[in-house]
């Protein structure tokens, strides 16, 4: 047996956290991407910059800011705890939130590119054929930006799998709760004689990331050369 | 009069302004490039909001600046054939044709997929993707899509512009048959004298003006 039950447990937790993070982020990422691609409003440049912050800030800073906001004394965390009895600190849900914030910029970028590739004049054509703005969105913009949404999903997922800094500073490194792949590798590195564990976990990491990148590249090729090619 | 249009709109430095009434049949909107012919068509279709004026088609007021009436494009029932086709790239020809048909109220539909396909001679295109069509084929599909949407009139914006010279006369034939056989009123934008000659219709001149 190459992998131990403990490895699978870590992988399962990582997949759960990453999947939750991406599903949580997707609607927000789409709304933000749409606003940035199509909207005209004051402060657009600032919004764009703020969304990209997690890409350039030290992840530890993001984790610390999450701690401030979502901790029991924080403005959001306090409300969650008092009104809903929900705590995200030191929980896998908190890990998912940290991963979501870190994945957001990549996801917004991918979706924004695909929305910008949709010709708004094609949507005008749909309007003249009787489509309300909402129907036009569902039948034209959404399907045409699907490759970008899929790419965002995969990139966001891969980013979440690799999350480390924001997670460890926000929800710590608790076995079975917040110890995702990268944290498990870090922990194993601290223990002398556990090179084999490090190797196995690293291999899982590499396989996941490589798979995600290949899938995303294949999708973006399809986007470039596929049905969404020019018409006329 | 079927069309009763009196609109103006400031676009950048130029003032686009026109006023005309036209009976059913085909009416050319004629003028040099850059005079704002397409903008006028967009204002009739509801894609561009006039600064003031009114648009009435078939006795219904679609826009009235003073009266606060501004029907959105999807409630105007005007088929629009664009210069560049603008077919939906993610839908096959059949789904493109039926897009507006499915949205039209049953009482507004006046033709069927079979009739339109036969009228335009596009049977063999139904299962193709738009990107595999030639310019002429795509424009036929675009015309069919507009007819099937239950339109009470067609707006055509230089529909021959993206079609090979040798194929243009086929599309002109289609347009003349829409005028004579289907008796669908049309506003037709062009700046091409040969095309205008061939369609031999009343003209509304749209000239550029600056303010």
Image (spheres, grey):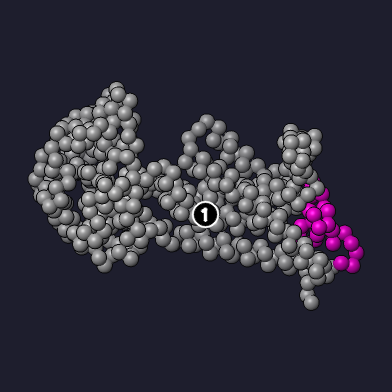
Q: Is residue B2 above or below residue A213?
A: above
Q: Position of residue B56 (x, y in %)?
A: 22, 33
Q: Nearer the viewer, residue B1 or A83?
A: A83
Q: Position of residue A197 (x, y in %)?
A: 82, 67
Residue B58 appears in the picture as rendered: yes
As drawn, the residue found furthest toward the front would be B107
Magenta region includes residue B150: no
Question: At 54% from the left edge and 43% from the top edge, which residue is drawn?
Answer: A31
On the rendered image, what quadrant is the N terminus of chain B found in? Answer: top left
Q: Position of residue B70 (x, y in %)?
A: 32, 31
Q: Nearer the viewer, residue B93 or B31?
A: B93
Q: Is residue B104 left or right of residue A90?
A: left
Which chain letter matches label 1?
A
Q: Position of residue A99 (x, y in %)?
A: 69, 50
Q: Is residue B154 left or right of residue A219?
A: left
Question: At 31% from the left edge and 28% from the top edge, which residue is drawn?
Answer: B69
- Residue on which the image places disc 1: A148
Q: How many marks?
A: 1
Location of residue A2 (image quadrant): bottom right
Is disc 1 placed on a helix, strand or loop? Answer: helix
On the rendered image, what quadrant is the C terminus of chain B found in? Answer: top left
Residue A165 appears in the picture as rendered: no
As drawn, the residue found furthest toward the right would be A192
Q: Nearer the viewer, residue B123 or A104?
A: B123
Q: Is residue B86 left or right of residue A209?
A: left
- Stretch of the chain drawn in magenta: A168-194
């Amino acid at each position: 047996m190459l992998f131990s039950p403990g490895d699978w447990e870590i992988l399962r937790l990582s997949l759960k956290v990453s999947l939750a993070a991406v599903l949580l982020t997707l609607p927000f990422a789409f709304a933000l991407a749409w606003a940035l691609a199509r909207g005209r409003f004051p402060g657009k440049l600032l919004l764009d910059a703020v969304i990209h912050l997690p890409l350039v800030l030290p992840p530890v800073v993001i984790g610390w800011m999450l701690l401030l906001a979502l901790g029991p004394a924080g403005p959001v965390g306090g409300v969650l705890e008092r009104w809903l009895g929900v705590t995200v600190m030191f929980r896998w849900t908190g890990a998912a939130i940290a991963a979501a914030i870190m994945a957001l910029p990549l996801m917004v970028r991918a979706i924004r590119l695909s929305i910008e590739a949709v010709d708004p004049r094609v949507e005008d054509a749909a309007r003249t054929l009787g489509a309300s703005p909402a129907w036009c969105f569902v039948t034209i913009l959404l399907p045409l930006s699907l490759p970008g949404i899929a790419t965002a999903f995969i990139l966001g997922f891969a980013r979440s799998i690799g999350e480390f800094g924001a997670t460890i500073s926000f929800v710590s490194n608790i076995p079975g709760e917040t110890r995702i792949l990268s944290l498990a590798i870090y922990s194993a590195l601290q223990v002398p004689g556990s090179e084999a564990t490090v190797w196995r976990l690293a291999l899982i990491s590499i396989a996941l990331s490589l798979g995600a990148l290949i899938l995303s590249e294949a999708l973006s090729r399809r986007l470039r050369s596929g049905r969404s090619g020019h018409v006329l | 009069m079927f069309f009763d249009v009196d609109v103006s709109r400031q676009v950048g430095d130029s003032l686009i302004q026109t006023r005309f009434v036209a009976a059913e049949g085909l009416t050319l909107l004629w003028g040099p490039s850059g005079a704002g012919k397409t903008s006028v068509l967009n204002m009739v279709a509801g894609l561009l909001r006039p600064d003031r004026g009114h648009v009435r088609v078939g006795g219904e007021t679609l826009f009235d600046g003073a009266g606060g009436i501004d029907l959105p494009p999807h409630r105007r029932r005007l088929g629009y054939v664009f210069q560049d086709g603008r077919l939906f790239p993610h839908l096959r020809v059949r789904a493109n044709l039926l897009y507006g048909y499915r949205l039209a109220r049953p009482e507004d539909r006046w033709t069927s997929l079979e009739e339109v396909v036969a009228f335009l001679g596009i049977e063999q295109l139904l299962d193709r993707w738009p990107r595999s069509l030639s310019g002429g084929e795509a424009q036929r599909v675009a015309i069919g899509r507009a007819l099937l949407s239950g339109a009470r009139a067609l707006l055509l914006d230089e529909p021959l512009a993206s079609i090979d010279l040798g194929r243009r006369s086929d599309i002109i034939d289609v347009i003349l048959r829409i005028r004579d056989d289907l008796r669908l009123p049309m506003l037709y934008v062009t700046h091409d004298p040969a095309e205008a000659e061939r369609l031999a219709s009343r003209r509304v001149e749209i000239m550029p003006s600056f303010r």
